[in-house]
Amino acid sequence: MQPFIRLDAKVAPLPLANIDTDQIIPKQFLKTVEREGLAKGLFYDLRFDGEGREKPDFVLNRPEYKGAGVLVAGDNFGCGSSREHAPWALMDFGIRCVVSTSFADIFNNNCFQNGLLPVVLAAPQVQQLMEEAKGGNHLVTVDLEAQTVVSPSGAVFHFDIDPQRKAKMLSGLDPIGETLQARDEIDLYEMKRALAQPWLEDA
């Protein structure tokens, strides 16, 4: 998993509440277990019309937001089903951080396990960030070490995060990487078990 330390990127405003995981990545794109290539399905029904043409008024299709790395959204982002493809699609599109007042629990957990940072801010701060993102300057800084979001105007918003999750994001540790930190102990256990119970090796 790629570490998340500091992100300087464009911010795109998506002022919609209750965006569910089926809107983030519709079911027809769930046939793969590969994380790459899912960007084409991100917000598909919002980004494209019935003929597969981009809707020019959707925020991520507008030229000023192309390449956005931060998305600021309405309440309860990521509700609905537990599909892990949702954070995969956001990251494949280039989005490394989503800011909202609240996230659905399973989506929130999936984000941390895949390197996408969900930032919770108070409603007035999210609204200010949303309004500033609609202006001429779209650049923000998300600093995980300092636990701050710096808006285009320079306003600094502090956010809370579980210390263990913060440490794993800074180090780029997903559950597999965390387990492999104990590789020496695991190898020693396997060796001792093979000596003490050799018949298990043939099972």
Image (cartoon, helix red, strand yellow):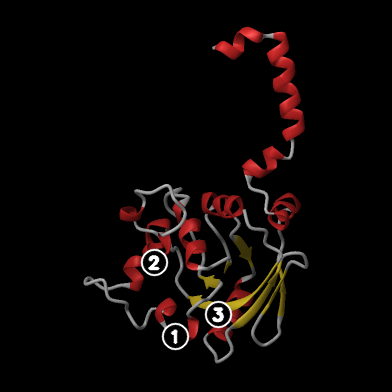
Above or below residue 172? Residue 199 is above
C-alpha gap between disc 3 and disc 1:
17 Å
Does residue 40 appear to the left or right of 70 in the view shown? Answer: left
Compare residues 151 and 189 and report the one nearer the observer.
189
Can you tell which mark lies on residue 55? none
- Which residue, given by chain and number where applicable, does mark 3 sit on? 130
For badge 3, the amino acid type reads: Met
Name the residue: 78% across, 68% down.
Answer: 146
- Which residue, given by chain and number where applicable, does mark 1 sit on? 63
Q: Position of residue 2 (x, y in %)?
A: 63, 57
Name the residue: 70% across, 15% down.
Answer: 193
For badge 1, the amino acid type reads: Pro
Query: In the structure shown, which secondary structural element does the residue marked by tag 3 occupy?
Result: helix
- Which residue, given by chain and number where applicable, does mark 2 sit on? 43
C-alpha gap between disc 1 and disc 2:
17 Å
Nearer to us: label 3 or label 2? 2
